[in-house]
Image (spheres, rainbow, N blue to C red):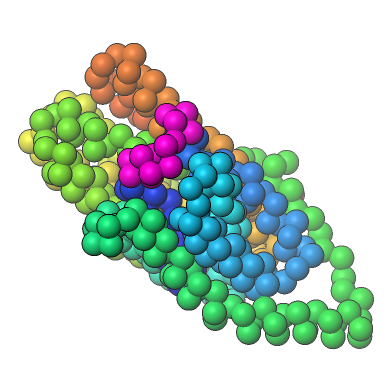
Amino acid sequence: MLLVALNLRAAVTSLGALLDEVRTGLELSGTMAGFVTTLPTIAFAALGALTPWLVRRVAPARVLAVAMTALAAGQVLRVVTDSALVFVLTSALALAGIAVANILLPMLVKQHFPHRTGLVTGAYTMALTTGTTVAAASAVPVAHAFGSWRVGLGVWAGLAAVAVLPWVPLAVRARTAARRASRTAVAPPRIRIRPGRTRLGWAMAIYFGAQSLSGYAIMGWLAQLFRDAGYRPEAAGLLLAGVTALGVPIALLMPTLAGRLRTLRPLVFGLTAASTLAYLGLALAPYGPALLWVALLAIGQGAFPLILTTIGLRARTANGTVALSAFAQSTGYVIAALGPLLVGILYEATGGWVAPIGFLLAALAVQTGAGVAIARPRYIEDEA
């Protein structure tokens, strides 16, 4: 699971770091480059929704092995082409693997570690954050060292290939067990859970979407905000990297706290307070206390590991977990796709950061309301 988690953003953040080189090398138009940057949220939303359907028909270990193989293959194929269209299609193949793995990991935690949900979720979220940070920080140096952006992107296919290996024997055993079961007994029908028909499902989706919206907006625009405030580009990039780097220990701590608390309200309100202070600070005094605002943003982004943990805490069964995970993430990523777009529109229209930050504060208010709704113990199986 940790090897899989290391791969869940590397293909995205390495491309972001090398986007200028890719645009030049493949002669991508501005429209095509913009589509490439929004492709992750589209893929996560559309393909993630199919995962429960796959799991009802194929063992999760087999699905995950195929997903990681698709991720590795997509990353290799997209760096050996000179066609912009093929690059987009093979990137979509890689992102399809990530989309499926996004949904499966909470289910697998529930299935294999039902009494250690917080600890294991924290560990894989920390691995995810580490992979995100390392890929973003090292893609450009690797590309420069080898003299090609293709190496800077393609090297991460090796990590995905390594992540496939432990799942191959599990997938083989799952297939053998399924054949034996089909010969000896009739499996009981699974009750289909539809989170989209429940208040809990929608509250989870809104919380996931609102926190992802702010996360993608921060990743896309924070460096520009610091540059506008007077920082050199290198310093602005380091400040942005600081948000992700400080998020690594928070990613480990947050799920552990969530698993121990009877109600999640203290965490929901604490994360809201940190984000609010950070946004106000960025609007009023972005230059001086920049490190403080970065630290507060990192704390506020702890909403991501919190919601991943809550997916497992709000389902009794692995079947309920995968259904809730698919609905919350697929719907949430649709919401998240609006973040960088609307921030960019407001920034261009006003020429400043007051309006974009006001929008992020409004999204934070929505996130907090949804957080209160999911804070008390309840289960998706009881509402579906």
Is residue 214 shown in magenta?
no
Q: Where is residue 232 in the image (x, y as percent from the top left)?
A: 11, 37
Indicate the position of residue 33 as horizontal and vertical percent values: 44, 35
The quarter of the displayed image where residue 317 is located: bottom right
Q: In this view, does 43 lie to the left or right of 235?
A: right
Q: In this view, does 360 lie above or below 186?
A: above
Residue 204 visible, this orientation = no
Residue 233 drawn at (x, y percent): 16, 39
The quadrant holding residue 134 is bottom left
| Magenta highlight on residue 21 | yes
Q: Residue at x 81, y 59 (%)?
A: 191
At horizontal 46% and vertical 65% (from top left) the residue drawn is 157
Residue 178 position (above or below residue 81): below
Residue drawn 59% across the image and 62% down it: 70
Pick whichever, 86 or 111, lies toward us. Answer: 86
- Residue 87 versus residue 309: which sits nearer the camera? 87
The picture places residue 76, in percent across and down from the top left corner, at 50, 61
Question: What segment is highlighted magenta in the picture?
Answer: 20-34
Residue found farthest to the front: 82
- Residue lying farthest to the top in this orientation: 349
Per the picture, the main secondary structure of the magenta-coloured stretch is helix
Residue for point 65% across, 73% down: 61
Q: Is residue 165 visible?
A: yes
Number of numbered labels in the structure image: 0
